Amino acid sequence: MSAAPPPRADRRLVVLGLLALGLAFVFTALAGLPPRRVGDGSEYYALYLSWEHSLRPWMTQAAYVAYDELFSRHEIMDLVSRDALAAAFPALRVGDTADFNHFWLYSLLARMVGATLAAVGLHVSAHGAFIALHGLMLFMTMALAHRHYGLRGLCVVAFMTFASPMIWFTNKVHTEFFTYCLTLSSVILVLAGRRVAAAVLLGLAATQNPSFAIVAAALVADRLRNFRQLPSAAEAAGIVLAGLLSVMHPLYYLWRVHVVTPQLLAGGASLGHNLSTFYIWFLDPDVGLLPNWPLGALGIVLGMWALARLPEKRDPSRYNGSWWWFVAVYLASCLYAHSSTINLNSGATPGLARYALWYMVLPFPLYLEALDWLRSNWKRTGAGVVLLLLLLPHNWRVCKPQLPESYAKPSKLSRIIQTKMPWLYDPPGEIFRERYSGLGEAAEAKASQGIVGPDCRKLLLQPNEHHGPAIAPQACGFDQQLLDAHVRARLQQRSDERYERIDDELYLKLKGQASHP
């Protein structure tokens, strides 16, 4: 894979102009869709209003009044009420002000975009300002890809954005699209040998997700290890900026609430708690990236095939030690951060976990390889177009921006496995409980001590202090009292979370049928 020759200035301006017009049209249409709050969206809307009405990075009474007015207008579906929002994080209150579990910079950037548009006569709502920010960030990412890889770089970014689960996040006020654009841009810059510039973008991403500061530091360290080549003035400024951005999040919360990140105080994180299940972000049929993005998985396979078939065309300058150092640190820091969440089956998602999307930017060079291989032969090109057209409708059906968040139902692949081949895979208990109880994070699901899968044979035993009734699909036809008694008896024998199989004898008993000798 080699970088494209720098395009002529006039041609580049034409391409960027058309790109700006196209994205303006797309994101104007996205902003026109009915707004819907997902996940932590209420926090970002509230902080936007705090910047607008009080010029503060925390909530004030004026900001709460403005938020209550927004809530009362019913412009945004599923928006959390003022009272619920104000009561959400008692540990983060400071006097008459309050912070949230999520940092304020994303909201500040949206407010800056909204204020800039207003200055030229284009007045947009808080939601519209966030969507405009998304459009601007994607334009910058695509322009960067075009600068280093020409039209094929542009095509790959378009594929990764609009033919993937990321399309669902384009009109959602949540930091996932912000993180995606910054991390993908950093990948492009690392491949281009611009490690300090990549560190600056990762420092910006670290304001919302502090683990990216580790990756930014690793890139700076990699640049400085060559003592014979001193940093230029621009690189020195970039190193300072990357450092300042990387410490902004912890220093702010140390000042406000005396912890480096609010989730350690208000809840939401337990360092390294789920490290043993790191594979779920890639392979789990419900929350994993590859099973829920078949187009992306296919692109990775094609890219690896192209590298194996055409090694003589591989550009060694792109797959050098700096690239592999970046990949290793990126994976290690992200996996540790994700293993520290206490909410594996998180919301604000079209199905797969938001955390899985942090890894989708790393195969960018493989998608370039795949595109080069496909376009080198007209038959391959035709086959690639056909595959894209066949799989795009599926991606649109499950990830179109109009859909609400969905994390309480299993994916089709997951249901097939747990119905036909339940022995093949045992997901973490939280994922199985929330997907197969049909209740998501509801109290009834958390209280239950047993969840029966769709095959009516797989039973998840989960001890808790609530001793709630077991949950089984209605189609199983189980006697509730007998099922509860069995679950209690099994947990008395061994009080750890585990899967068990309902054998034939027990199955007939639970259905009220006597077993025959």
Image: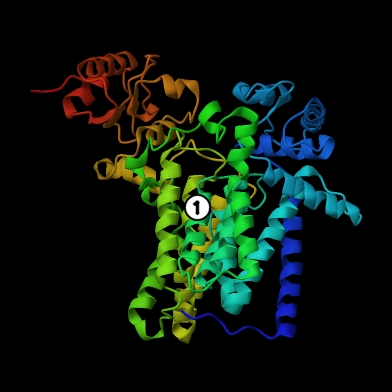
Residue at 74 percent across and 78 percent down: it is 13
Report whether 70 appears left or right of 359.
Answer: right
Position of residue 176 relative to residue 494, above or below, is below
Q: Quadrant of residue 481?
A: top left
Residue at 82 percent across and 31 percent down: it is 66
Using the rendered image of the protein, determine whether residue 128 is visible from the camera's viewpoint.
no
Residue at 75 percent across and 54 percent down: it is 132
Position of residue 477 relative to residue 252, above or below, is above
User: For this rendering, which residue is in front, 255 or 110?
Assistant: 255
Q: Residue furthest left?
A: 517
For mark 1, does the 10 Å Cα neighbourhood hold few (<14), some (14 to 19), or many (20 or more) residues? many
The colour scheme used here is rainbow
Identity of the amino acid at label 1? Trp
Which residue is identified by label 1?
358
Using the rendered image of the protein, determine whether residue 317 is visible from the camera's viewpoint.
yes
Q: Position of residue 74 (x, y in %)?
A: 77, 33
